[in-house]
Image (cartoon, rainbow, N blue to C red):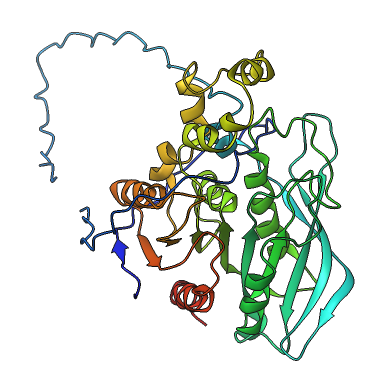
Amino acid sequence: MGPVTHTGAMDGLRLRAATALAPLLLLVGCSETPSADEPASTPAPSATSESPSEDATATPTGEPTEEPTEEPAVEPVEEESPNPISVAALARAELAGGDLRLGAVRERSAAFTSYDVTFASTTAGEGTAPLRISGVLNVPTGRPPQGDQGWPAVVLAHGYIDPAVYVRGQGMTRERGYLAERGFVALHVDYRNHAESTDDPRIETAVRLGYSADVVAAARALTDSRDVRVDPDRIALFGRSMGGGVMLKALAAEPGLFAAGTGWASVSSLEAENFDQFQRPDAPVAELRASYRGRHGLPGEDPEFWRGVSSRPAFDQITEPVLLVHGRLDDTCPPRWARASQRALTAAGVDSTLEWYDDGHAFGPAFVAAMDRTVRFLRTRMPA
């Protein structure tokens, strides 16, 4: 069965003030039986005063006039600072990135060369040195199609793998190679606390929002690199499973940085749903409550906090087109999550598309078809 498409409309971007970063991060992978109803193909709604002006009239002179009375000064209202662990705080932060360093060659083929790399990301806290994030970089063979402007590039945000067993570049090896063979520089981000990356001791307390900071840093590292020529206007972000949530938060926090976003088999855009699916089943409620005491409550106890660390309430900040790809048979991340996220993106004015395939969470039989669709989307949004 071919893909079913839902589309939406794009809104404009906003301006934000930058402030110092508090360390931040996201929730997990996925697991529930998908809903049985097939997605219906429905057209997405699209969004679109005129105020009369009057000429000022001169006041006749000659008659004495009263001195104008001064209006009482209005005290400026200070904007309330967001919770330091929130997508809003991530958006206010100065998310740093750069110093891409190429290490050992992992693989060399006719189509691309693969390198171990590291780059700098946002600090773990005030007074600390920048984190070093490890990853794997695939660079196509030959010269960029746009000469001095450089290659189009894709930053890859992998899904949940226990950091205790995770190894460099794990989780999106197929996608990284597929993209490089088709002329995209592909940078797989390991995230902090993974592989050879620096550990951030507050990773779990901050609900993994720092992963989104790391993919933002990766884009800036590609832009600044002297070793790899990348077009700064053609960098996309591609997230898988948990990485789909990382992608949406990064787009909301840094509108205009990426040219497009893609999410495959993504987690929910509401973190309370992710918590209920992936963490609550693994431990008794009393144990979970104890582990969060002094930090924040469980979703039922502190719903405002859990909305604050979710991407969905911030969808109106996203300015890039988004492609969501999901399997109808996904028994890890329920298909209803993809439908809900795409509808919310459309309602927020985001140019969004949802493609369905007859496949599960890992994308086996439909992998090539889904990657071809993703490449077409990227080439449309980042033309050569």
Residue 265 or residue 231, whichever sits in front: 265
| Lateral position of residue 366 relative to residue 69, left or right | right
| Lateral position of residue 188 relative to residue 196, left or right | left
Image spot of residue 232 (x, y percent):
61, 67
Image spot of residue 384 (x, y percent):
52, 83
The image shows residue 71, relative to residue 13, as above or below, that is above
- At 77% from the left and 31% from the top, the residue drawn is 125
Residue 287 or residue 302, whichever sits in front: 287
The image shows residue 34, relative to residue 170, as above or below, that is above
The quarter of the picture where residue 17 lies is: top right
Q: Is residue 174 visible?
A: yes
The image shows residue 291, relative to residue 58, as above or below, that is above
The image shows residue 343, relative to residue 383, as above or below, that is above
Image spot of residue 79 (x, y percent):
47, 21
Q: Is residue 79 visible?
A: no
| Lateral position of residue 366 relative to residue 177, left or right | left
- At 49% from the left and 74% from the top, the residue drawn is 366
Q: How many marks?
A: 0
Classify the position of the N terminus by image quarter: bottom left
| Lateral position of residue 102 relative to residue 281, left or right | right
- At 74% from the left and 54% from the top, the residue drawn is 190
Image spot of residue 318 (x, y percent):
44, 50
Given the current orientation, which residue lies at the most extreme right position?
104
Residue 1 or residue 43, whichever sits in front: 1
